Image: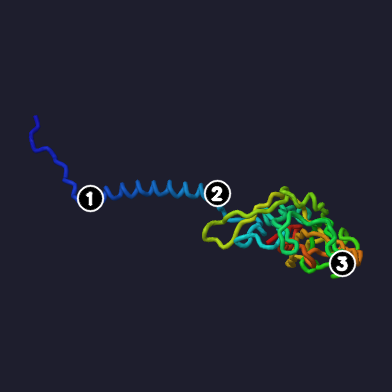
Amino acid sequence: MRTGIAPTRKPTSILQSGIKGTTILMKKNLKILTATLTSLVLAFVSLGCTPRTGIEVGFRTGATLGRHSIYTGIRSDSNVFALENVALDFYFGWSKWYYDNRSVEFPTRDIISGRFEYVAVAVYFARRQHISWPSNDGVENFRKIENFYFIREISLEMFFTSSYKVSTIGLGRLSQESGLEFAYSERMTIPQHILTTRKGEHFEIHFIVEVIVFDHYELLYVRSQNWHGRFGGVSVFQHYLGNNQVKLI
């Protein structure tokens, strides 16, 4: 039978115990922090807060809707397109219509001062340098205007309804602006001949919606903003990247 003193463990110092406990606590907190950050990132992405590579133009205005009657906007999830397929979501509509400083439901077809008559709403594409009509006096055919790409016309009775209404939405108490909410939108493709195909060049492309007025004295169609009406327009810059690719900003 063996006899002798049994080996004993060295006592752990208070310092060693403290270091070990701190290390375990740090690892635990690190796991919690990692899980929290992961949740925040996932929430950030789910809310659509990732860096935008698309286009959004025309969706903000002043604190209240002003005297502009027609508003327009453009949206797209991408800003790079094939030259033959520059398709964007276009938003447009009306908010108020002022006639002799009175807000009315929609422009009347009645002849103003025995001379001017609202006849239709016209939708166009045009380059920035061509957004003026060829003559300030008017044109014989508003569907065929030089340097304008006529998309279509909409009757006053159809346009000035709830289907094309524009309203405001709040952006927060600290914001000096309001968001615009459009009842109507549609996807349209910008015609190739309006776009530039010279690498490095850029042009400003306009989307225009305006009320057309007929001048019964001159027997010409004139732009509504010259009289009691309003028109809406929004634009994007187009750059040609080469290889039939264009970028919109």
- Categorize mark 2 by other alpha carbons within 10 Å: few (<14), some (14-19), many (20+): few
What label sits on residue 138 in the rendered view? 3
> At which x and y percent is residue 84?
79, 54
How much space separates mark 1 and mark 2, taking CA atoms?
47 Å
The quadrant holding residue 81 is: bottom right
Q: Is residue 66 left or right of residue 107?
A: left
Quarter of the figure with the N terminus: top left
What kind of residue is marked 2?
A: Leu
What residue sits 83% from the left and 67% below the top?
Answer: 133
Task: Give the camera-side residue of 218 and 59.
Answer: 218
Marks 1 and 2: which is nearer the front?
Answer: 2
**What residue is disc 1 on?**
16
First in sequence: mark 2 vs mark 3: 2
Label 1 sits on a secondary structure element that is helix
The kind of residue tagged 3 is Gly
Residue visible at 62% across and 62% down?
62
Q: Secondary structure at mark 2?
A: loop
Give above or below for 226 relative to 169. below
Residue topped by disc 2: 47
